[in-house]
Amino acid sequence: MRIATTIFLTDETVTPVRLARALEQRGFAGLWLPEHTHIPADRRTPYAAGGDLPAEYTRTLDPFVALAQAAAVTETLALGTGITLVAQHDPIVLAKQIATLDHVSGGRFTLGVGFGWNVEEAADHGVEWSTRRELVLDRMRLMRALWAPEPTPYEGEHARVSASFAHPKPGGGSPRVLVGGGAGPGLFAHVTEYADGWLPIGGGGLGTSLPVLRRAWADAGRDPATLQVVPYAVRPSPGKLAHFAEQGVTEVVLQLPPGTEAEILRVLDDYAQYL
């Protein structure tokens, strides 16, 4: 099983360069980073995990800048976002950022797509909360038009672009795309429409949800052998990873604490038992 990691990198944690080098040296498969542009001080949206919002949410580094640093000092380490808040980006600019990072990393980038949980954060970006999923779908379609081999227009309800020259192109015509979030028909419709698979946060309940996703994937005419499921932000144990393997999972992303370099190295040494 491929073992990657995710972490809330901030201005107070280990740096992207030091972490990326440590991961590759130890044989970890990848580094994935979350995204929050800002956290409004008057936030009323409750933190999904309960209690106070952890301080690292207010200090996250930009994932594309940090992953570009990681790409520059590694050769094989996979890179991913877990997740990119697509609704909070200009899709033409985002398509360029994604294609560029994939290009300079030699095709090592995976785009994790998500819809967000913080209503106030999204509102500051002009996002209407009730239609954010439709907005993400439109923007993903637009980005795929820009990544197409030939100039391709796109006209949707929430996004449009004229037929354009847009380079570089991601390797293979698109980076790997995985959609993060809780199981359900709405999320699985996104997975089957434009993604290569699913990022189930924590990985709980796969025994129930995976058969549903596999049926939706097949009903959409997708090749069953191509569906990828990557449990994300997992707190590992031998039993949990064995259960994932029984479900056909071949890749998992383990959660690292938002710590200093010394703290992170200790956790990586502990996680090495799963490699």
Image (cartoon, rainbow, N blue to C red):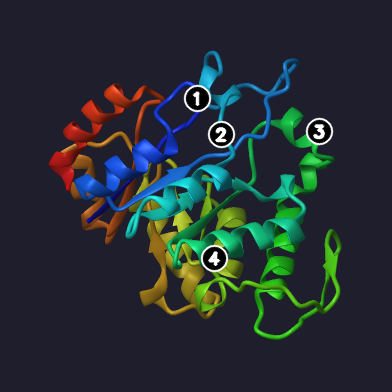
Amino acid type, label 4:
Ala
**Would you say 67 lies left or right of 226 here?**
right
User: Which label belongs to residue 124?
Assistant: 3
Q: Residue at x 67, y 71 (%)?
A: 144
**Residue that label 1 marks:** 49
Asked whether, in this view, residue 178 is left or right of residue 240, the answer is right
> Compared to 192, does 25 lie above or below?
above
N-terminal of the pair, mark 3 or mark 1, is 1
Per the model, the C-alpha gap separating discs 3 and 4 is 27 Å
Residue that badge 2 annotates: 61
Residue occupying the point 76% across, 61% down = 92
Q: Between label 2 and label 3, give the one nearer the viewer.
A: 2
Depth check: 99 or 212 in front? Answer: 99
Against 244, residue 119 (above or below) is: above
Q: Is residue 189 visible?
A: no
- Quick check: marks 3 and 4 in contact, CB under 8 Å? no
Q: Relative to the observer, which residue lies in front, 247 or 20?
A: 20
Task: Find the distance from the CA under tag 2 to the CA under tag 1.
Answer: 21 Å
